Image: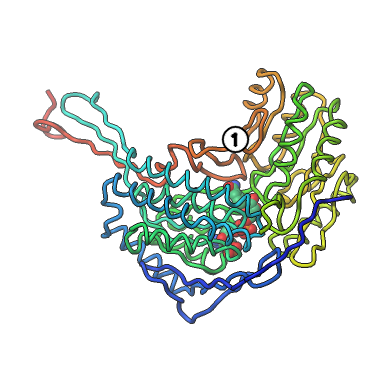
Amino acid sequence: MSIAVRPPTLKDHSVREFDMLIDGQWVAGEGGRTLERVAPSHGVVASRYHIAARKDVEAAIAAARRAFDTGPWPRMRGAERAEVLNRTADLIEKHADEIAFLDAFEAGKPITQVRGEIAGAVDIWRYAAALARDLHGESYNTLGEGTLGVVLREPIGVVSIITPWNFPFLIVSQKLPFALAAGCTCVVKPSELTSGSTLLLGRLLIEAGLPAGAVNIVAGTGAEVGALMTGHADVDMVSFTGSTGVGRLTMKNAADTLKKVSLELGGKNPQIVFPDANLEEFADAAVFGAFFNAGECCNAGSRLILHKSIAPEALERIRALSQRVRVGDPLDPSTQVGAIITPEHLAKVSAYVADAKAGGAAVALGGETLDLGAGQFMAPTILDRVTPDMAVAREEVFGPVLSVLTFETMDEAIAIANSVDYGLSASVWSASMDTCVKVARSVRAGTIWTNTFMDGASELPFGGYGQSGLGRELGRHAVEDYTETKTLNMHLGPRTGWWVPRE
Ligand code: NDP
């Protein structure tokens, strides 16, 4: 197989060093422990972080608590909060190169793709700034002359934000600006593998004028730092993105203190293709959906459900396009698929492919790891003759592996689509609007695309059904997610009641 590879090269490399942000100060933390991140594409140390001990996490939570209970942030006018969010957006744009390098080098993501994610993040910060000014409750003037009912929206309090490694800067930007827009204060923990861009964001927030303690950023592992952040009594809400397993653990941990929990978890997203679909456009979306971010994407279109009559032609088109995908050095602007996050993860992805082959699937393309001289890479892989019961068709592989299944009737396609535990996203391809709408209404997923894949906008809610999560991010209700409602029941005129007979 001929794959267009880009072997990793590196010049002028220096290890980036990071402290943590607690109560407006950059600190090394108790005990001065550090953690090193090795670039998955180049095999050299990319960054070194000071990591939090229990005392540091407690200090971060206490700082957020104080900033919420007595600090200026929750008490500011929406317009003032919007100003800080907009200034942050400006600073993100100004430092886009630095952020892009960090995410590309630590996560192995193609740098051109990361630049697109940063542009998307800037848009989200600006959108949240607009929502900060528009957050409002309701009033009821219909409850009789003696009552005026007002429903207030108040910030929920201290929010723990925990993010994964696959979209380090974009995912923190799907949570933090909305929490801040609502007037909450936060403790943020990025993945131990990709903490750089989130810690850099801390610097930008301070420069933008965010008061001390309103955002605290701690580094470290989920088992140590994350677990404390999800169970602590002074935290009011947890917003988590990551695997379904850790999401479940997060919910259990938060249950003792009955925190609100918002979860964005995994996906096993189908693309259903009918005989009247535009196969040229679909093939492009299939390749993009499967191999974008090396398939390390909750929204990856990892399952194709093709009508039997067009399956051979569709598969051939996808195979031909996939061979042209440029794999390799994430710092090369022409690269489309970068490195796999860790050697352990590569082994996990390879095991899925081996298991599928043993179960009767045929490798239509790839299937092997790529030795590019440094780091860990995998060839874009297409598995044909996959059946709905195989692990590769049901579980989140989180690698560049596309499974091809077939159907004969619409009901069968819908049943296959709905046969997994996940329900994050799906797409339907057909020239018939009737077919698209029927399938869109029947597939249980938080986002359905028709005749496209993985488009998005800050205005459109994102989240999953079933084991894909709880709650929605983005969209105009995203700020409300970080609020409590308070009912203000105002009595007007003389009060009559228990002992004073009502007229
Ligand atoms: P993990 O669930 O392993 O980790 C996510 C975050 O949770 C990390 O910061 C991790 O810390 C932390 N964490 C780990 N254990 C605990 C714990 N016991 N308590 C609290 N926090 C903990 O996911 P990955 O980072 O491996 O990311 C990949 C997964 O995320 C995939 O399964 C993917 O589907 C899902 N995902 C879902 C998205 C969605 O929006 N639906 C978006 C992106 C990813 P650390 O790693 O530092 O130890």
In the image, 409 versus 458, the foreground residue is 458
User: Residue 101 location, x and y as percent?
Assistant: 59, 60
- Residue 8, by quadrant, is bottom right
In the image, 154 versus 257, the foreground residue is 154
Residue positioned 75% across, 29% down in the render? 273
- Residue 250, by quadrant, is bottom right
- Residue 103 in the figure: left or right of residue 261: right
Q: Residue at the front extreme?
A: 11
Asked if residue 492 is positioned above or below residue 75 in the image, the reply reads above
What is the count of numbered marks? Answer: 1
Residue positioned 88% across, 48% down in the render? 359
- Residue 37 in the figure: left or right of residue 66: right
User: Residue 260 location, x and y as percent?
Assistant: 44, 50
Residue positioned 28% across, 39% down in the render? 487
The residue wearing badge 1 is 447
Crowd class of label 1 (few under 14; some 14 to 19; many from 20; radius 10 Å): many
- Residue 396 in the figure: left or right of residue 60: right
User: Residue 78 location, x and y as percent?
Assistant: 30, 45
The amino acid type, in three-letter code, at marker 1 is Thr
Per the image, label 1 sits on a secondary structure element best described as strand
In the image, 39 versus 483, the foreground residue is 39
- Residue 204, by quadrant, is bottom left
**Residue 262 in view (yes/no):** yes
In the image, 222 versus 307, the foreground residue is 307
User: Residue 232 location, x and y as percent?
Assistant: 43, 63
Image quadrant, ligand 1: bottom right
- Residue 421 in the figure: left or right of residue 369: left
The colour scheme applied to this rendered structure is rainbow
